[in-house]
Amino acid sequence: MPNRPPIPFDGTPARNRRRTTSTIRTRPPLAGLGLLLATFLVAACSSAPSPTAQVAIDQWLTCEECNAGELAAVLALGHAALAPLRERLLTGPDSSKIHRLEDALAQRAQRLEDSVPLPHIHPPPHHGHLSVRAQRYVDTFLANYTAVVEKRAALAVARIGGPEAKAALQRAGTLSLRSDVHDFIVFAHDSLWVP
């Protein structure tokens, strides 16, 4: 595209007018759109963890003995792991996982109750409903599972460190959480490394 003299706005020819601004080359409109799309894709990809990263995070949050390097695998992801860990810290376990776990626990509780005969003074629960004892079993297990996920998310966030981690832990400290989880979040925040 050849350089053209700027179009005069006041009627004076461009050669007689003093230049106060430099000539700016403009990009064709499609190039700007391509740049905008590329920026959006980079931002979207950086916020969503890769499937491999998500597996490592899930293994850390749900491991039983945690002796196979689960935390180290999450820490190796660095700041890319902060967004999903922050979400688990602030909202608890993924709701679809909670529903699947709740169904499995209800079935287990039902099988346990069926294997232990109740005295005749207790009527059997209606089909599809849990007795008070079975519901307490499910609720206790789910509460403990949620607490473990939140504590592990807090620990990993604190170990990754940085201002984003500090903000996430401060936000989590304002939530209405179980007392042991709240105490752990305070501990994680106090031991946080911020450069």
Image (spheres, grey):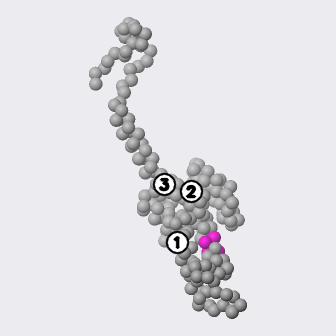
Residue 100: mark in rendering: 1
Residue 25 appears in the picture as rendered: yes
- Secondary structure mostly seen in magenta is helix
Q: Position of residue 49 (x, y in %)?
A: 46, 56
The mark that comes first in sequence, 2 or 1, is 2
How far is disc 2 from disc 1 in space, using C-alphas? 22 Å
Horizontal side of residue 50 vs 94, given as left or right: left
Query: Please, what is the three-letter code of the amino acid marked with disc 3?
Result: Ala
Horizontal side of residue 151 vs 66, given as left or right: right
Residue at horizontal 46%, vertical 62%? 54
Q: Kindly report which numbered mark, 3 or 1, lies closer to the viewer in this rendering.
A: 1
Q: Circle 1: is it few (<14), some (14-19), or many (20+) Cα within 10 Å?
A: few
Residue at horizontal 48%, vertical 51%? 47
The image shows residue 180, relative to residue 10, as above or below, that is below
Q: Kindly report which numbered mark, 2 or 1, lies closer to the viewer in this rendering.
A: 1
Residue 155 appears in the picture as rendered: no
Query: Please, what is the three-letter code of the amino acid marked with disc 1?
Result: Arg
The image shows residue 68, relative to residue 5, as above or below, that is below
The image shows residue 148, relative to residue 83, as above or below, that is below
Q: Which residues are magenta?
A: 140-144
How far is disc 2 from disc 3 in space, using C-alphas? 11 Å
Residue topped by disc 2: 86
Residue topped by disc 3: 80
Quarter of the image with the N terminus is top left
The mark that comes first in sequence, 3 or 1, is 3
Q: Circle 2: is it few (<14), some (14-19), or many (20+) Cα within 10 Å?
A: many
Residue at horizontal 65%, vertical 81%? 131
Tally the numbered discs: 3
Outermost residue toward the left in this view:
2
